[in-house]
Amino acid sequence: MRQLKVTRAVVGAEGPARKKQRSVASGLLDAKEMTLLFTSSPAKRPRRWVVNAALAAFFMIVPPMVILFGARASAPPTVWISAANVLRGGDGSPLHWSARSYDKLLGGLLADGFDEGSCHSRYQSAMYRRNAGRKPSPYLVSKLRQHEALQRRCGPGTVAYSNALEQLRSSKSDGIGSQECKYLVSISYRGVGNRILATASAFMYALLTGRVLLVDPSNEMSELFCEPFPDTTWLLPPGFPLTTYTNFSLDTGESYGNMLKNKVLRTDIGDVPAGVQLPVFAYIHLDHDATQEDKFFYCDEDQSLLRDIPWLVMRTDCYIVPGLYLDIGFREELARLFPEPDTVFHHLGRYLFQPSNHVWGLITRYYDAYLATAQRRVGIQVRVFGKQPNSPALLEQITKCTQRHGLLPELLTGTDDAVMPPAPSRKSTAVLVTSLKSWYSEKLKNMYWENAAITGDAVSVHQPSKEGHQHFGAKLHDTKAWAEIYLLSLTDTLVTTAWSTFGYVAQGLGGLRPWVMYRPENDSVVPDPPCGRDVSMDPCFHAPPFYDCRLKHGADTGKIVPQVKHCIDMSWGLKVVDNS
Ligand code: GDP
């Protein structure tokens, strides 16, 4: 039986500076290579992880379940505007899909009243989206407006914020439920895709728990994205008292998991009694290497304990939202916010991540030059790693996937060109390839030049950047990565690489259920089938718990809640699906 309950808070006795810190960041290894390293070395795993791995293998196959879930939300009022200056084709018609009139506030998702010049993408992005996306529920819209008010009331520069900082400095909690404002600091690290999913996850948790979200400004967060909340900032200002917070890791003594393990916190005595002093902050470690104790975070009784801790600092490189569905207390609210459950990241992503003006320039110039005039746009994300050699098998996987599913036309051999239809009836397809390497797009481009498409379509292949390998902390590199994720989200059909958060973000923003290229067991063998249609556009959670909080034992968490299933690209991962 699990022993969980609060006895007392002793954080003040051992300040964070005295704790041994271990940085998990490394400029030498590719982020995904680090994941593989962490997750494939049994010697480095805590014992609980071994249990998780065994459960993961056991729960690889999930029988489909069909449920009825909620009614669709009625559409909130929309604000339509006309676009005066739009790019036009030769016949004078607008090249952008919805340029004549478009809903610039995305069905009320975005707040009005921002200075448009400070963030052009906020008001122009709808004009670039052929797929207008799903409508947010009226409840989500009202909750976002309430949350913005909270961010203004308690955010940096307010008296409440100064008081909360003072409380953190003195390490004295005022007691249960007495805080006017509570905070969640989200650590930003790893690649752009990971950072976006981590921030969206933190925001979802902040929304559910009424916490002010403050984002660690490391890794160019302020240069990639506009401010999402009007008249305040979401960036954690300099001078934060927990000076080493960006180094918090698995070993940090104040992590929730370690405080449970060391019995600093317990949840086996029911509700927190009045007068009990909780720590003024807890570090929430939900990274890929989180232990079972860390993952008790996803249980109701642990949430009732965390509710009263004024400051939480969270590190994750995952999309934890499927885990939040496991908490009964959150589930009802999530259902109200997202009557279409597979749209969680779709809405939160479009709400939070507006490209900064610099990035928006990269996106729109590329789109207008290479994609706008095509009748069909196909995005292909080819995630490769620094030292991985060019792979003919991966190229074959790409062509097999795209041609088998009619995403790209098959090719005629050279002598058959005479059967092509006349030029005016040919369709144009622009293929946007994103990859660190240029080899794959060059091969595709040559294929569609040297051979005619069976349909007679004109197929053009474009790749914005060829960065070679992942760089850490390089501004231009990150802005290009973000621009390319966004460009992928503007395509009509998307092919992604398994396990990649880069692709997950593109599919969620675009409202696209992608074709996912399966991860090969052997690099030289093309998986059969080469790809499959994803079950939902919501991202996959790579490090979920395997524990039933109600029954208090290990379980297949892909079978507990109808809205949460296993991912097609990672058998132990979890994702939110719409089964209605
Ligand atoms: P993930 O590692 O695939 O889950 O995606 P992340 O975005 O978190 O990390 C990968 C990082 O590698 C990106 O953020 C970029 O810095 C770089 N990268 C990987 N693929 C590409 C690509 O196709 N284009 C660009 N510009 N950068 C890429």
Image: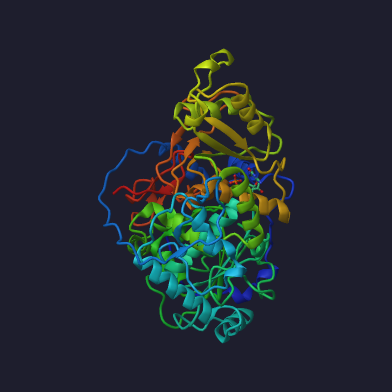
Residue shown at 48% from the left, 25% from the top: 455
328 with respect to 82 (left or right): left
On the image, which quarter does residue 305 sit in? Answer: bottom left
Above/below status of 190 relative to 50:
below
Q: Position of residue 192 (x, y in %)?
A: 62, 53
Residue closest to the eye, 105 or 9: 105
Q: Where is residue 311 in the image (x, y as percent from the top left)?
A: 55, 73
470 with respect to 147 (left or right): right
Which quadrant of the rendered structure holds the N terminus? bottom left
Q: Name, please, the residue furthest toward the front.
A: 91
On the image, which quarter does residue 162 sit in? Answer: bottom right
Residue closest to the eye, 460 or 36: 460
How many tags in the picture? Answer: 0
Above/below status of 534 relative to 323:
above
Q: Where is residue 111 in the image (x, y as percent from the top left)?
A: 47, 70
Q: Can residue 5 be seen in this view?
A: no
368 with respect to 515 (left or right): right
Residue closest to the eye, 468 or 463: 463
Q: Position of residue 273 (x, y in %)?
A: 40, 78
Residue shown at 52% from the left, 58% from the top: 125
- Give the colour scheme of this rendering: rainbow
Q: Name, please, the residue furthest toward the bottom.
A: 159
Q: Is residue 449 visible?
A: yes
136 with respect to 499 (left or right): left
Residue shown at 58% from the left, 52% from the top: 194
Above/below status of 121 relative to 131:
below
